Amino acid sequence: MLRKYSNHRTIQDNIKLGALTAFSAGMVNVASVIVFFSFTSNVTGYYAIFAQEIAKGNWYQGAVVLFWILLFLVGSMLSNMIIIHGKGRFSTYLTHSIPLGLEIFSILFVGIYLDFFYKDSLQETEVLVGALLFAMGLQNGLTATISNFVVKTTHLTGLTTDLAILISMFTKESNRHNKALVDKFHLLLSIVIAYVAGGLISGLSFAFLTYKTFYVVCFVLLIIGFYDYYKLYIIKKQYLQRHRQDPVSV
Amino acid sequence: MFCQIYSLTKNGMSIIKRKILSRFNFIFLALLLFVATTMVMFYENPERMLEGEWVEQGWYFEKVENNPSFKKQAIIHDEIKTAAIAHLPPLQDGLWHFERNGNDNYVAHHEDKRYNWFLKGRGHILELRKDDKLVESFVIHQLNRNELILYLNLDLQAKGIARIVLKKGGRVNYAEKI
């Protein structure tokens, strides 16, 4: 999922990455709506709210929304910067894992803070929502960068448009046999389903786990991180085994 | 300044020097982040603004569903109002008092101090809880030093949204009013 870059990625790589990250984004979004009354996986609505608050003369609320939008932006920017500047210096897997690690750290911070220190004050809420938006920015920046802008998982506006276009295109016989279009359709559909499933599971699990739901999100993200680590470990092990058994061929 | 930012190309078109633009992006972004963070930290926040005593000015219908015979902005019948806040004893006398004592936010002016208030989102949701369980939530439509306008979903005798208008004032103003 993480060790391949851009055009080297297969559709299976993108589906796995897209589905798992969309699942975690759906979970984060629903949990944050329950706890904070604020969406944290997209910023489209916040642009409108920002304009509305400024128009109403609510400078404080306008500043809060601007703060959130900027944190999402900084998260996405940081993710891309780590990847493009880390290329050639570190392994692809390590470079791609750093934004994911930062995302896990941000969500874990929110989970731990809620669990042990949260006093329900407005300022705490604003900072914690900001931390989650930063995490979602990191995730979106990561998936978009490594998949060559094919996979975006934290919001579904553009994805719904693409899906609608594909559904329309499939009304023509020739498009139904176009592998690239069919693959894209499968990718988009898996992202939508995973996002909704993540939201659903988050909503249900919140009743039992409350703030610990954020730890479950971290666990899902850890699966993404360690999946490739495991794959690389297996490949390395197999390679070494093969060459130990057959030293002549080396 | 503009001479530095813009340079004239051979074909006469002006383009932004990319290196300067790239630096400008970072400076602009850092500046915006600094302004937003400073405002969030030091500007008078809705929690502080809400603290104190608020006197009810009236309850109005903002929207009524499936009942065109109701007029918009009609004053809510006392019976409906009473039913809407039957579960909120501290608010029944028309004086809403939001008190804060350290980390404890409670609805005062009532013998029962178990009712707490919290602001959520960007300060646009007012939650009232009793023993840490949600009792009612209002959408804050407007909040300034003198006026507070809340929206409450009604689903009792009449379906719709109630607009509650409150003015900042103490016990003295309230006594004068009644």
Image (spheres, grey):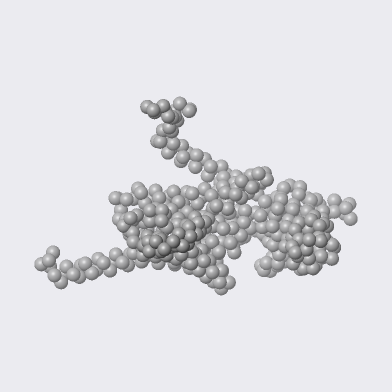
Q: Quadrant of residue A205?
A: bottom right
Q: Residue at x 81, y 61 (%)?
A: B69
Q: For this view, does A125 lie left or right of residue A78? A: right
Q: Residue at x 38, y 50 (%)?
A: A82
**Residue A4 position within the rendered picture, expressed as x and y whole percent measured from the top left:** 32, 58
**Residue B118 position within the rendered picture, expressed as x and y whole percent measured from the top left:** 67, 59
Q: Residue at x 39, y 65 (%)?
A: A16
Q: How many marks?
A: 0
Q: In the image shown, does A45 or A105 lie closer to the viewer?
A: A45
Q: In the image shown, does A5 or B93 lie closer to the viewer?
A: A5
Q: For this view, does B39 lie left or right of residue A238? A: right
**Residue A239 position within the rendered picture, expressed as x and y whole percent measured from the top left:** 21, 67
Q: For this view, does B71 lie left or right of residue B14? A: right
Q: Residue furthest bottom?
A: A208
Q: Quadrant of residue B61?
A: bottom right
Q: Residue at x 39, y 61 (%)?
A: A174
Task: Say if residue B165 shows up in the picture.
Answer: yes
Task: Say if residue B54 shows up in the picture.
Answer: no
Q: In the image shown, does B75 or A219 lie closer to the viewer?
A: B75
Give the quadrant of the N terminus of chain A: bottom left
Give the quadrant of the C terminus of chain A: bottom left
- Against B124, is A213 above or below? below
**Residue B103 position within the rendered picture, expressed as x and y whole percent measured from the top left:** 65, 58
- Against B171, is B25 above or below? above
Q: Residue furthest front?
A: A173
